[in-house]
Amino acid sequence: MLGAMLDKIFKAYDVRGVYPEPLGEDDAWRIGQGAAAFLVEQRDASTPAARTIVVGRDMRASSPSLAKELIRGMTERGASVVDIGLIDTPLLYFAVNHLHAAGGVMTTASHNPPQYNGFKVCAAQAKPVGESTGLKEIKQAAAAARPAGAAGAPGRVMQQDLWSAYAKHVLRFANLGGRRLKVVVDASNGMAGTMVPLVFGPRGANVPGLTIVEMNFENDKGVFVHEPNPLLPSAIEGLRAAVVREGADLGLCFDGDADRCIAVDEKGAAVGCDHLTAWLGAWFLKSNPGAAVVYDLRSSKAVEEDVRAAGGKPVRGRVGHVFLKALLAEHKGVFGGELSGHFYFRDNFNADSGAIAMASVLTCLAQAGKPMSECVRAVARYPQSGEINFRIEDKDGALAALKARYAGRGKIDDLDGVTVDCFDAEGWWCNVRKSNTEPLLRLNLEARDEPTLRRMVGEIAPTLGERDAGH
């Protein structure tokens, strides 16, 4: 029974569910026990730091009580805890490295609505913990959690404020070089509302030449003006209008825990995160010639082409921060990006950071000396379908049919879902992935021109099921 309950909240990359059912304080205590067992007991704990777990939380109304029980579970299992309080998720990654801790757990439900909450876990050096890299073991230990006091002497809890050290770290990436920039920042009533003033200063005062216009920075009411998911067109409508109204150079929108960041140009048009990856990647390669740039396999062909043109090594990977972080480390890459708005940095312990993405975009835009729309125009050269969802029960059958249909016409691989690449011969390619939680297939298709894009979406769609209007 307990295992079935935990199955509902343990996902591929994190723990997440509606509060208080199926995710409540008892679950948080058990997850604390499981995290301590995995992060501390299975490792060399000869130093105090190696027995220490960093814990942070977001602004959700349920986060304080869940974090409290999470910490209690950890300390009763013998781990010590550094509680760094109300933070954005990237600050947790910084803290784990800054303190040389055994790992960290962030209490957050990221971009989900306010009734949700959850936990993101990382190991030493902020290495991601997903289903295949530790979450399964944490779930097993949580299900078999010991009664309070059974582990002997409890660990200590220490509070620590790391905002000053974190701000210094992030601002290493920010340099406008004497240019003045005005940016509208939509915090989505999430943790960017706390992070941006503490890192970049009130209205951008910590970065010479920067002026920040704040939107939805209030995050103490537990409500969202719009969904804290910047990938939704509805979530950035207000930002797009505000950029034009303010005559700003740029707009930036964060998700709930501020680990993701998307951009809007000076005309109010959304900038594709894959286009940002190509643009920023070429910029990072100027000072890191020959380095690898990693990207998820849904990204535009322009990423691969522009990274090569800049003298870098393009490395294509599976979707998800667990895979992109590992890929960046494996290839000793300098930078990476995902279509979802996660951006990864070698000089940030290979971890993603919305704050450093903001600093990097501002720096790159200032050094470019031209409007954002012109910076990405050449990158956004291929028409894209965007992600189209199809409802179908037999997902595996549809993917097999897709592979059979296009066998011999192009390159096909199964790195993540099915990718059919006919770009060289026919001017199009696509990726189709399964949803982990719903009977859905997700199509992303790109072509050299609009007629080919429309034709191929029309040709492939019947294979994938009924188009889902709700996603």
Image: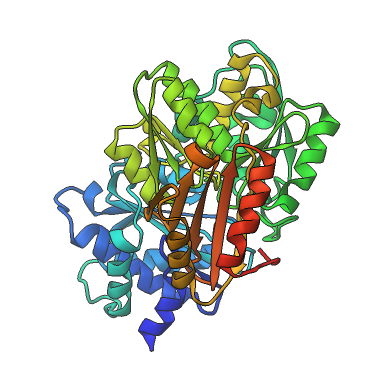
Image coloring type: rainbow
Is 157 placed left or right of 230 in the picture? left
How many badges with numbers are in the image?
0
| Residue 121 x/y as whole percent | 38, 57
Say if residue 356 shows up in the picture: no
Q: Is residue 198 above or below residue 156?
A: above
Q: Is residue 434 above or below residue 378?
A: below
Task: Quarter of the image for the C terminus: give it.
Answer: bottom right
Residue at image coords 27%, 51%: 102
| Residue 221 x/y as whole percent | 70, 59
Say if residue 448 shows up in the picture: yes
Question: Which residue is more in the foreground, 469 or 461?
Answer: 461
Is 248 placed left or right of 467 in the picture? right
| Residue 32 x/y as whole percent | 36, 67
Is 109 placed left or right of 128 in the picture? right
Task: Quarter of the image for the N terminus: give it.
Answer: bottom left
| Residue 228 x/y as whole percent | 65, 54
Residue that sits furthest to the right in the current view: 245
Residue at image coords 34%, 21%: 290
Q: Is residue 6 above or below residue 12?
A: below
Is 380 placed left or right of 65 in the picture? right
Question: Which residue is more in the foreground, 99 or 464?
Answer: 464
Question: Which residue is more in the foreground, 308 or 119?
Answer: 308
Residue at image coords 27%, 39%: 330
Residue that sits furthest to the top in the current view: 178
Residue that sits furthest to the bottom in the current view: 1
Task: Determine which quarter of the picture holds residue 98.
Answer: top left
Residue at image coords 26%, 78%: 146
